[in-house]
């Protein structure tokens, strides 16, 4: 079929392409069948897929989207291939989930493992680099949860889904502020006299004059004042 000449007034081509009006009814039927198929598949995959996605769950979602997208719009594509793909995805997910419940190595290989990003008030730079996690992203996650500085947390984990889990320090200690630099006035309100923090990893030292000191943990020479939690 030759392409029709371009025309801004050709609304049929603009809205339907080369399909006919009755194809709308077929699209309605295809969409209904696909919707039911996706509901059944998601139900069979379990609650895990309905939660926060790991890399494995994202791959499932992308596979299903690619499988059902074309048949919804193309009259020359049938619905049987998406059904076969959906069955394969369900079987594969259930097999991996069952095997992973008894073989943790397989589970972590597919979905990654929990990562320790901070401990005892300082950042773990090796893990940050390994996971390609920017320091400011960690600080953002802390601010969202209401934390003000690194000294308030004992552990910071990044879960396989990419979410963050915090274990509070008991008691909290002075630490590097995670408040944004544009709000230096607020940061300074929590300043602790006689205590400094490494700006790279958050390690604290008991001195107000850290100039020239090398951080024992990360090797940085850049220091700032440590802070404590502001009263609420």
Image (tube, helix red, strand yellow):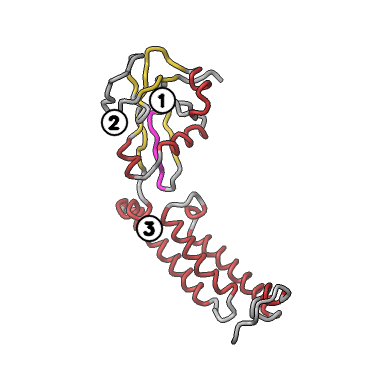
Residue occupying the point 42% across, 61% down: 93
Whether residues under marks 2 and 1 lie with C-beta atoms below 8 angstroms apart, the answer is: no
Measuring from the top left, give residue 22's x and y in whole percent: 70, 80
- Identify the residue position indicated by label 2 in the image: 218
Give the CA separation, mark 1 to mark 3: 43 Å
- Identity of the residue furthest to the bottom in this view: 1
Query: Going by the image, does 112 lie left or right of 5?
Result: left
Per the image, label 3 sits on a secondary structure element best described as: helix
Query: Considering only vertical position in the picture, is 33 above or below 105?
Result: below
Q: Which is nearer the N-term, disc 1 or disc 3? A: 3
Is 27 placed above or below 153 here?
A: below
Residue 38, position as x, y percentages in the image: 55, 65
Choose top left, top right, bottom left or bottom right for residue 24: bottom right
In the image, is 35 to the left or to the right of 62? Answer: right
Q: Which residue is mark 1?
A: 176
Numbered range of the magenta stretch: 154-160
Is any part of residue 203 visible from this angle?
Answer: yes
- The residue under the point 57% across, 63% down is 39
Mark nearest the camera among 3 and 2 is 2
Tag 1's secondary structure?
A: loop
Instruction: Return the residue found at the far top.
Output: 193
Q: Residues within 10 Å of mark 2 (few under 14, many from 20)?
A: some
Residue drawn where x is 45% and y is 17% of the image: 191
Principal secondary structure, stretch drawn in magenta:
strand
Please give the residue where the numbered disc 3 appears in the rendered image: 98
- On the question of residue 171 being in view, the answer is no
Q: Nearer the viewer, residue 223 or 19?
A: 223
Q: CA distance from mark 2 to mark 1?
A: 14 Å
């Amino acid at each position: 079929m030759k392409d029709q000449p371009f025309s801004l007034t050709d609304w049929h081509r603009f809205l339907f392409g080369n399909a006919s009006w009755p194809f709308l009814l077929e699209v309605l039927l295809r969409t209904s069948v696909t919707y039911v198929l996706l509901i059944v598949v998601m139900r069979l995959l379990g609650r895990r897929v309905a939660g926060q996605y790991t890399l494995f769950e994202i791959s499932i979602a992308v596979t299903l989207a690619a499988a059902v997208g074309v048949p919804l719009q193309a009259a020359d594509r049938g619905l049987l291939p998406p059904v076969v793909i959906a069955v394969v995805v369900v079987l594969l997910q259930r097999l991996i989930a069952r095997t992973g419940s008894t073989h943790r190595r397989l589970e972590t290989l597919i979905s990654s493992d929990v990562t320790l990003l901070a401990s005892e008030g300082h950042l773990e730079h090796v893990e940050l680099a390994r996971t390609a996690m920017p320091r400011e992203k960690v600080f953002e996650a802390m601010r969202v949860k209401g934390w003000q500085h690194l000294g308030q947390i004992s552990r910071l984990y990044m879960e396989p889904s990419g979410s963050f889990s915090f274990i509070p320090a008991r008691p909290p200690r002075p630490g590097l502020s995670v408040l944004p630099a544009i709000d230096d006035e607020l940061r300074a309100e929590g300043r602790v006299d006689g205590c400094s923090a490494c700006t790279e990893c958050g390690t604290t030292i008991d001195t107000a004059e850290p100039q020239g000191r090398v951080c024992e943990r990360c090797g940085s020479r850049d220091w700032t004042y440590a802070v404590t939690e502001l009263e609420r």
